[in-house]
């Protein structure tokens, strides 16, 4: 077993301040929209993870120039539908479902054939949920039983569509929104509540978008044909990355942490709401609005006992990437916690609902798991003294990082494989952990 870390000591109490890298969702969306602007757009604090780097590499293959420096990224866009490339090129989305699905929306209008491929994990995920609506615009696809690799041939005469997005997938919604940008007429989307970064960016760029909301769905109308002006952007910290340190602080003794300039978009803060319901101390300071996004500092303290929860289903979509961590907190609750309607977790890089249960079971925590739910029997006195090995999780970066947090909070001798998986979303994760005082050994 190579490329792993070993952790055998819980982290000591800490009182620190951290600045976390830029939001991955916003980094990818900025790059894709900047590619459609005419001229130079500049981004500060772009996340330099594999998912974002793969986005830039794909855009380069499509004829878009970029320059990535230590503190910023410039993209020289060719205007709407301005991709220039040879027929039959291959784009590698790596591990990124966001890139793989969103870029298909931009390719709906280009007649030259493009092949999209991905790594082993991404190649097992369902792409029919996005190829089906994009076919209605006029694009043609050849797929591997609905999975990658996928060949797309666009059309010169796309038609606006009506689309019902019923799974709460921001990726599918955003892909259709991007396809609608250069489609004459008005595309109408009925979308189950999910992340709204694309809608906020569309509004900031003064694109022709109209949104009406009710309790469960957003009704989005996009009229295509308006050009995008070059734009500059400073990306706030990613709350999904911050969540690892929030939970580390909550589960550690006598600790306090300040996280600076965090994106607290309401479609992403389900993790904060759920953890507060469980008794966590999380305060929001210095809140402001930047380019339509809510940004603030977060102050977290480890105090009080953890309460069990019947997690509100309405918060699922706004916490979908953080449930593995929430499960760790539930493991220390004084009682039984219930989480339902989470089948979407198994549409991620690995079957995360199953992996959440596996990690807890290895820790000695009883769970009952189904295809869409998990019941966790918490133990407030949990203290691990045995050896635990985490491997064969399809190199899912969130499984790796969640296991690290568990090891640092609960004790035991942990051996966690595929440490390079963090390059997908959070390359500096281990250095940030070390800066808080964590001890670990790394093997290659």
Image (cartoon, rainbow, N blue to C red):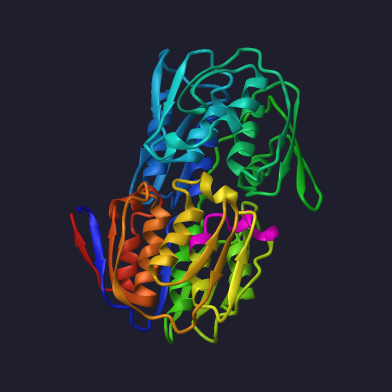
- Image coordinates of residue 183 in percent, x first then y, are 68, 22
- Image coordinates of residue 109 in percent, x first then y, are 58, 19
For image coordinates 47% across by 49% down, the residue present is 351
Q: Compared to 147, does 28 lie above or below? A: below
Q: Quadrant of the C terminus?
A: bottom left
The quadrant holding residue 409 is bottom left
The quadrant holding residue 17 is bottom left
177 or 402, which lies in front? 402
How many numbered badges does the structure rendering display? 0
Q: Compared to 71, does 129 lie above or below? A: above
Confirm whether residue 293 shows in the render.
no
Please give left or right for residue 270 compared with residue 159 in the image.
left
Q: Is residue 205 magenta?
A: no
For image coordinates 26% across by 74% down, the residue present is 8
- Image coordinates of residue 102 in percent, x first then y, are 54, 34
Confirm whether residue 148 shows in the render.
yes
Report the magenta residues as a range.
Answer: 313-324
Q: Compared to 179, does 98 lie above or below? A: below
Please give left or right for residue 193 compared with residue 46 in the image.
right
Q: Compared to 24, does 163 lie above or below? A: above
């Amino acid at each position: 077993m190579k490329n792993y870390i070993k952790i055998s000591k819980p982290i000591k109490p800490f009182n620190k301040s951290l600045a976390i890298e830029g939001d991955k969702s916003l980094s990818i969306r900025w790059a894709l929209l900047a590619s459609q602007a005419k001229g130079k757009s500049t981004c500060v604090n772009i996340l330099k993870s594999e998912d974002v780097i793969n986005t830039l590499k794909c855009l380069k293959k499509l004829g878009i120039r970029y320059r990535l420096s230590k503190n910023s990224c410039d993209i020289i866009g060719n205007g709407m539908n301005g991709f220039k490339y040879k027929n039959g090129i291959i784009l590698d989305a790596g591990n990124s479902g966001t890139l793989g699905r969103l870029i298909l929306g931009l390719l709906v209008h280009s007649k030259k054939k493009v092949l999209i491929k991905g790594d082993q994990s991404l190649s097992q995920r369902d792409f029919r949920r996005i190829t089906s609506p994009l076919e209605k615009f006029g694009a043609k696809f050849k797929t591997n039983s609905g999975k990658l690799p996928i060949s797309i041939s666009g059309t010169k005469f796309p038609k606006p569509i009506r689309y019902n997005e019923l799974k709460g997938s921001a990726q599918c919604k955003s892909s259709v929104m991007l396809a609608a940008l250069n489609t004459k007429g008005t595309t109408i989307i009925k979308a189950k509540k999910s992340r709204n970064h694309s809608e906020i960016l569309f509004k900031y760029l003064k694109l022709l978008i109209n949104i009406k909301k009710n309790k469960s769905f957003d009704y989005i109308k996009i009229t295509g044909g308006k050009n995008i002006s070059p734009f500059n952007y400073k990306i706030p910290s990613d709350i999904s990355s911050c969540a690892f340190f929030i939970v580390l602080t909550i589960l550690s003794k006598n600790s306090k942490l300040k996280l600076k300039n965090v994106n607290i978009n309401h479609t992403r803060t389900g993790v904060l709401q759920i953890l507060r319901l469980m008794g966590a101390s999380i305060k929001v300071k210095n809140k402001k609005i930047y380019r339509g996004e809510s940004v603030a500092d977060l102050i977290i303290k480890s105090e009080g006992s953890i309460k069990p929860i019947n997690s509100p289903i309405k918060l699922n979509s706004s916490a979908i990437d953080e449930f593995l961590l929430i499960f760790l907190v539930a493991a220390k609750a004084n009682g039984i916690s219930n989480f339902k309607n989470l089948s979407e977790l198994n549409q991620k890089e690995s079957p995360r609902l199953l992996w959440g249960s596996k990690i807890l079971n290895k820790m000695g925590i009883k769970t009952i798991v189904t295809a869409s739910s998990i019941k966790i029997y918490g133990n407030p006195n949990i203290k691990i003294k045995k050896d635990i090995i985490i491997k064969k999780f399809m190199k899912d970066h969130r499984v790796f990082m969640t296991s690290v947090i568990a090891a640092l909070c609960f004790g035991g001798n942990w051996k966690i494989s595929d440490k390079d998986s963090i390059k997908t979303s959070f390359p500096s994760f281990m250095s940030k952990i070390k800066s808080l005082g964590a001890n670990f050994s790394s093997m290659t």
